[in-house]
Image (tube, rainbow, N blue to C red):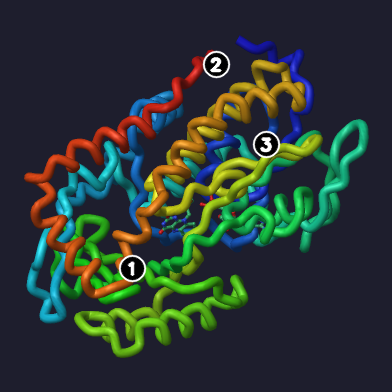
Amino acid sequence: MNNASRLKNKHILISGAGVAGPALAYWLHRRGFTPTIVERAPALRDGGYAVDFRGEAHLTVLDRMGITADVRREQTNMGAMSYVNEAGRKISSMPADLFSGDVEILRGDLGRILHRVTEEHVEYVFDDSIVSVTEDDRGVQVTFERSAPRRFDLVVGADGLHSAVRGAVFGPESRFVKEMGLYCAIFTTANHLGLDHTGHLYNTPGKVVGVYSARNNTEAKAMFHFGSPPLDYDRRDVGQQKKILAEAFAGNGWETPRLLKAMWDAQDFYFDSISQVRMDGWSRGRTVLLGDAAYCASPLSGMGTGLAMVGAYVLAGELAAADGDHLVGFARYEEAMRDYVAGCQKSADGVGKWMVPDSRFLAWFMTQNYKLLPYLPWKGMIAKSVRRTADAITLKDYGL
Ligand SMILES: Cc1cc2nc3c(=O)[nH]c(=O)nc-3n(C[C@H](O)[C@H](O)[C@H](O)COP(=O)(O)OP(=O)(O)OC[C@H]3O[C@@H](n4cnc5c(N)ncnc54)[C@H](O)[C@@H]3O)c2cc1C
């Protein structure tokens, strides 16, 4: 067990109150550090689709945080999802056991749980963003868009795919973010199809639109994926992003017009490229990156949220084990996570092609494939490969 009085570098600024940031704050506080979180949004960000926890490492972290029961209480309990034709008739189903993890929860619900278990001990500063990080021998001087400058011992960038910390300390996004040729959008809407713990998907070449029930069928999530070369748009301009989506799906059949109409009123609209972050190193001096900011595996991996939570556990654990020595702690964090991250990123290879087929033939082939999947030999192989990726890390017990 580490000795709190021996700890160095106690004051730690975390950028981002998504998943990785609050999870790290939880562990840092528990190990004797004093974390502060700065979040650009004015309040906790809701929205996003269901995220999965898969395998021993994910479940162990939830357990050690004492939030397994909370997560299970709010799990989605989704059944199989169906592909439908233009008239809404079911063509085939994707088996739930293959595509959902061990526990599935809406990202927004998970965010609220993480906030609840940290808010008492962690200072949250909303509606602000780090502008610059200047390091000297004793710590870092941080300037913000709105707050007065402050000093901290260490800075953690847990601010997602488009991390401001990564931009300020490591260099421009274009060096690290690899777009995978797809964009995705998701927002909450009415469950007008009366879906009962299920979802419907409709695909046309280069596009998939879907809707699935959420929060015990009281609402639904509309989701859109489409293939596109990199788009030039303002990430803070939601109106512009909605326009891009409306144009990409103009003329698309099935429920698309109704969903697009609802989109204009959606308060939790999420839009982004499907990308990975690849970096040779995740720390520089007193700054370290965590979660999507460092090693986004993309939604195609189905591992991103668990990866962020495991990373938070390991980073806080290694830092505490090194009595706060950041050079040692950061290096051990990276060593413990590298292979696991590589496996999770690799698991996304080729997934986009079958999720959003770019031709009529491939779209047809994939729906037939799902129909036959329960009887095909590769169902077991897919399941095994998912397990292997999820179980590719053995978590240390850092005590406490
Ligand atoms: C609103 C939202 C919806 C999402 N929906 C999906 C989804 O549907 N499917 C999916 O696969 N992934 C989604 N993601 C990404 C997913 O949450 C992450 O891949 C994963 O959970 C890893 O979490 P993270 O904490 O590293 O990153 P994120 O969950 O992306 O959290 C990053 C946080 O940093 C904040 N932030 C960004 N810039 C700054 C800044 N300059 N200063 C301070 N804070 C900043 C963001 O507002 C966010 O709260 C979504 C992310 C967000 C923010």
Residue 117 in sight from this viewpoint: no
**Tag nearer the camera, 3 or 2:** 2
Q: Is mark 1 within 8 Å of ligand 1?
A: yes
SS label for mark 1:
strand
- Marks 1 and 2, the one that precedes in the sequence: 1
CA separation, marks 3 and 2?
18 Å
Task: Check disc 1: other Cα within 10 Å, few if <14, some if 14-19, many if 20+.
Answer: many
Q: Gap in Å between the C-alphas at discs 1 and 2? A: 39 Å
For label 1, the residue is 223
Find out if the beta carbon at label 2 lies less than 8 Å from the nearest ligand 1 atom: no
Sequence order check, earlier mark of 3 and 1: 3
Q: Position of residue 172 (x, y in %)?
A: 73, 59
x, y percentage for residue 319?
67, 24
User: What residue is rendered at 41% in x and 50% in y?
Assistant: 349
- In the rendered structure, the answer to whether residue 41 lies left or right of residue 358 reads right
Amino acid type at circle 1 is Met
Mark 1 or 2: in front is 1
Q: Where does residue 157 sit, x and y in percent of width and height? A: 67, 46
Residue located 76% across and 26% down the image: 327
| Label 3 sits on residue | 35
Check contact, mark 3 vs mark 2: CB within 8 A.
no
Which of these two is toward me, 142 or 96?
Answer: 96
Q: Residue furthest bottom?
A: 251
Vertical position of residue 131 compared to residue 32: above or below: below
